[in-house]
Image: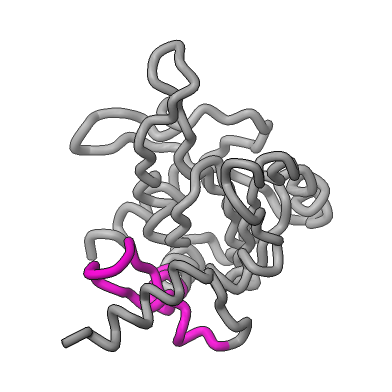
Amino acid sequence: MENPKAKKIARLEESDLHVPGAFADVLFSRGVHTLAISKKLHAENREKYVNKMRVALAVDEVAPIVVFKGGVSRCRNDSDFEELFRQESYFQYLFGVKEPDWYGSIDIQSGEARLFAPRLPSEFAIWMGKIASAESLSAKYGVPVIWIDAMDNFLNSFTTQAKISLQGTNSDSDQSIENALTWDRPHVQTVLSSLAFNNLAECRVI
């Protein structure tokens, strides 16, 4: 007897049709016969992080916009064969994005989140099938999606807030996140960058 939930996940995975606004029906899943998780989980994770950062900031400090870099796609040695992708852990915790080479931001002041996706050339449809629109990606992840080529203009429109990236060292691997995820955008590293990293690390374990 077929599992109705498995059939629903299969339909979501195959059609990639998610109704904007129907947030409870947007699921994170690795496919049929895997656990399906409501995207509400990632929204709750972001809310938890925002609240923790607000408490940690000084009373007279302007809340920053924290910019996150997702995992990057890599090819095997000198070939054009892409290795199996695994999302960067903090990015997965906050956004649940499956694809590589994305960015995200969270405005600690307003609590609003954004995702920035690479704009794929139309010819990619030859081997990838239909290229998703920003609107369909927004519906898929429950967060407004903007193309990466518009990311700098979007962030620079917030003139009174610092734009920071994470800065810190993983206590298990002793590897720094800024070395693991090399930035190609000049976001400022300040004392708030360490605060942003430490509070996010605590959110994941507490």
**Figure quadrant of the N terminus:** bottom left
Q: Please give the name of the residue rendered at 45% of the width and 16% of the height, measured from the top-left corner.
A: 79
Front-lying residue, 79 or 167 = 79
Q: How is the image coloured?
A: one colour
Residue 44 visible, this orientation: no
Residue 166 horizontal/vertical position (percent): 48, 42
Report whether 204 appears left or right of 88.
Answer: left
Q: Is residue 150 left or right of residue 39?
A: right
Q: Which residues are magenta?
A: 22-45
Instruction: Pinpoint residue 5: horizontal percent, then vertical percent.
Output: 29, 84
Locate residue 82, reporting x and y percent: 44, 30
Whether residue 132 is visible, yes or no, is: yes
In the rendered image, the quadrant that contains the C terminus is: bottom left
| Front one among 176 and 190 | 176
Towards the viewer: 150 or 107: 150
With 68 as the anchor, is 64 left or right in this view?
right
The residue lying at 48 percent from left, 34 percent from top is 73
Q: Determine the residue positioned at 39% across, 37% down.
A: 168
* Above or below 158: residue 127: above
Q: Is residue 112 above or below residue 98?
A: below
Residue depicted at 63% across the width and 62% down the height: 114
**Of the pair 138 and 94, the residue shown nearer to us:** 138
On whether residue 72 falls in the magenta region, the answer is no
